[in-house]
Image (cartoon, grey):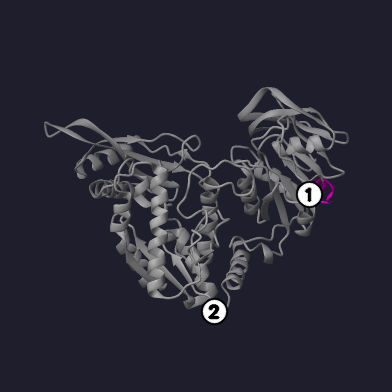
Amino acid sequence: MTLPHGHVTHQTILVLDFGSQYTQLIARRLRELSIYSEIVSFKTPAEEIAAKRPKGIILSGGPASLSEAGAPKCDPAVFDLDVPVLGICYGMQLLTNHYGGLVGVAAEREYGPAMVSVTADGEQDLFNEIPRELKVWASHGDFVREVPPGFEVLATSPNAPVAALADTKRKRYGLLFHPEVVHTDHGATILKNFAGVCDCRGDWTMSSFVEEATEKIRETVGAEGRVVCGLSGGVDSTVAALLIHRAIGDRLTCIFVDNGLLRLNERQQVEERFTTHMQLPVVYEDSSREFLDGLAGVTDPEQKRKIIGKIFIEVFEKAAKRIDEFDFLAQGTLYPDVIESVSVVGPSAAIKSHHNVGGLPEHLRFTLVEPLRELFKDEVRLLGKELGLEDEFVWRQPFPGPGLAVRILGEITVDRLNLLRQADAIVGEEIKRAGLYRQIWQSFAVLLPVRSVGVMGDERTYEYTLAIRAVESRDGMTADWARLSHDLLALLSNRIVNEVQGINRVVYDISSKPPSTIEWE
């Protein structure tokens, strides 16, 4: 189950996905404006699109070039629909081509920051209340050579004589840059202006999502269906459990699996929080031995993730059979997990697998229920507050499903896990003490498979190296390394080396996403 499309009565802007890594950000930015947005494949027939009664359509960017054979194109009849259309990057080029303009390979590509000059009247739809000069985020190798008949140029850039264009009578617009990316100044205003052209008033809220998702869960599960939920102790699975519990009450049973890859004292904290405070029906399953045996000798990160996912499902199935008969398995899967693991709608590239993405093995009788599958992390936090979760828990930093297994590079052993647990606890303590916990998206320790020579107490040591990772982000899709003070880094290094026997060197990761990922594995 994904977002409850079948019950949506909100004004909707559809996004046709041509494979851009930014496609989901378009929908995300529209939701920030309280506008319901749905992503569909570029292959969707025009009659299906019309049946959804959209107020507007956005054509996403994509990695292809119109000069290439087999470049993806939408149903031409989409352009005959009487709704405003906005093409972004590749979408603009497709729009230009459809209406008789000319698109070609640019002499100089634009990737990254670019300056755009608005040439149209300041009251023109898209650029209303937008400065005449603005910094944008570009990512294209093609450009518009000739503007289609009936269109005018709205903006230019040094390497693109047509950075934006429009046919205001037919309400057709194109942008060669990406307004959905936070690096584009006033990008949200541009999208808001397009929503105004679509006459979208913005009526989608977390409160309405709760009502619609609850209704959809009840419809999916039925009057007698029972759900078992994988509870990790994090925000995502907790919010999913609370939402499902709201819908079906005691027909939900949560199972917490101790996989031996948890942080320091995490099992005890989970038991206190969910049993005592939230009063959710939780069964605790200690399967640490199974996971550690399965990971013995494994160093490849993809193999680690797949082994953990496989064992998790096996443990779950056994526990569920022992407890009761269940028809549905609930997971707290989020949109960024899905985006990185599979091509969601368009032809985008898979980055890495996630243990909770991709469905279930065919032999399992469970049907998946994933009420958060198309939400971003910050949306889940808002949803948590809507469901009554306290701030301290809502703002808990993300923790990967595979746990510390993807923060130990190389082989997983009990000794290495214990080293990492101690060091990671110190990082968490000092980040909180510095008042940075909510400001930073994630802060954690990574144990490297590297030993180096050190000197402690006038004696030679040969011990492990630990990396500290701290990033700032809005939704996990992109991230920049956090500029922690030298004093804080010095404190972290000093405490870890002195308090964690087995580590004699600490380094700080200053890479961003992209090109790196947030987690090391």
Q: On the rendered structure, is 322 left or right of 120?
A: left
Q: Are marks 2 and 1 in contact (CB under 8 Å)?
A: no
Q: Which mark is residue 224?
A: 2
Q: Quadrant of residue 154?
A: top right
229 w.r.t. 134: above or below: below
What residue is shown at x 65% (from left), y 25% (from top)? 109
Q: Residue furthest top?
A: 107
- At label 2, counting other C-alpha atoms closer than 10 Å, the crowd grade (few under 14, some 14-19, many 20 or more) is few
Residue that numbered label 1 is attached to:
197
**211 sits left or right of 419 in the view:** right
Q: Work out whether 178 lies above or below 40.
A: above
* Type of the residue with mark 1: Val
Q: Is residue 316 above or below residue 162?
A: below
Residue toward you, 455 or 183? 455
Q: Quadrant of the C terminus?
A: top left
Could you say which disc has been placed on residue 59 in the image?
Answer: none
Tell me the amino acid under the disc marked 2: Glu
Closer-to-camera residue (61/259)? 259
Seen from this angle, which residue lies furthest front? 363
Q: Nearer the viewer, residue 324 or 475?
A: 324
Give the residues drawn in magenta, as a range: 77-83
Instruction: Assign a secondary structure to mark 2.
Output: loop
What is the spatial separation of the Cα atoms under label 2 and label 1, in whole angstroms? 46 Å
Q: Earlier in the sequence, mark 2 or mark 1?
A: 1
Any part of residue 31 in sight: yes
Task: Identify the image quadrant of residue 54.
Answer: bottom right
Name the spot of residue 180 as percent of width and height, x first: 64, 43
For the residue carrying disc 1, how many other residues have a C-alpha within 10 Å: few (<14), some (14-19), or many (20+)? Answer: some
> Residue 366, how many percent across, how many down?
50, 66
Q: Position of residue 458 (x, y in %)?
A: 11, 31
